[in-house]
Amino acid sequence: MSADARPVLRVTDLDVHYRRGTGRLHALRGASLTVAPGETVGVIGETGSGKSTLARAVLGLVRPSGGRIEIAGGDVTGHSTRQWRALRRRGVLQYVFQDPLRSLDPDLTVAESLIEPLLVQGRPRREATELARAYLDRVHLDEELLHRLPGELSGGQRQRVAVARALVTDPELIILDEPVSALDSANRVRALELLKQLRDSGAALVFISHDLGSVAGIADRIAVLYQGRVVETAPARELVNAPRHPYTRLLVSSAPTLSSAAGDRARREALRELLHV
């Protein structure tokens, strides 16, 4: 990112605490992240590391305990529910869920799901209908699916429709939360190919996953979350080839598509080092 480029997303020293019994659970601790226009940033970490909490905070679904969130140059940290609703209606940011059925209204056809956010923006129905067809083609689905309900589609088709719906408003930022984890291996490969193509859409992408192998082939940069903290951020190739933090080394050595002769011995060594951090 050049010195003059305004980040689409800037998260600074973000804290998120949840009440648990008489105490508090620290889901995020001073997490910071920037995403430039057109950049794809992967966020990886194991279950419970804070990945989904980060996504929910950026989407305004949880209120930060501290820190700052800026989207498209504006501070949204203290936004009210009404302000968040207005931001989403403008189509500035979109979200693709892990389970595509959560992204799509089960009672709306594919066409209605794609047209709805455009009508909310004030687009004429004819224009919205044409865009729905165009974006369905863009994710390599047949026009005949426009009249089907989500329950009549395969998991891979539903996820493609969810991606098309995220793209149709021409957003500046798309959050993808474990977008391939609910898919079988064949559909996962197709979905990853589609996500690679999304890099050309002009939108900034945040690809959240526990699978480093999936993220490494798509992301420009990768941020590693461990126990609610961003412990390392680096260009994808650099992070895979020369991880600095012990937890990152553990993830690299454990990734089936990335590990080689390192094997179990390297994983044990990384784990021992991690436990002494």
Image (spheres, rainbow, N blue to C red):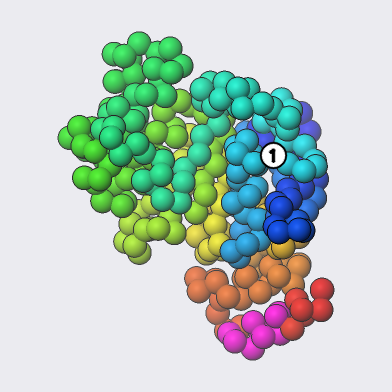
Estimate the x, y position of residue 69 in percent, counting from the top left. 72, 36
Specify the quadrant of the image occupied by residue 243.
bottom right
Q: Is residue 267 magenta?
A: yes
Q: Image height check: is 133 above or below 43? A: above
Residue at position x 50%, y 39% in the image: 95
Specify the quadrant of the image occupied by residue 276.
bottom right
Range shown magenta? 263-271
Estimate the x, y position of residue 197 in percent, counting from the top left. 43, 43
Specify the quadrant of the image occupied by residue 238.
bottom right
Residue at position x 45%, y 25% in the image: 169
Quadrant location of the N terminus in the rendered image = top right
* 227 or 249, nearer to the observer: 227
Q: Is residue 143 visible?
A: no
Residue annotated with mark 1? 63
* 251 left or right, relative to 113: right
Q: Is residue 24 visible?
A: yes
* 10 left or right, relative to 207: right
Quadrant location of the C terminus in the rendered image = bottom right
Q: Amino acid under label 1? A: Arg
Structural crowding at the residue carrying mark 1, measured as other residues with C-alpha within 10 Å and reported as few (<14), some (14–19) or many (≥20)? some
Residue at position x 26%, y 51% in the image: 154
Estimate the x, y position of residue 123 in percent, counting from the top left. 40, 13
* 115 or 15, nearer to the observer: 15
* 193 left or right, relative to 178: left
Q: Image height check: is 231 above or below 95? A: below
Q: Is residue 242 magenta?
A: no
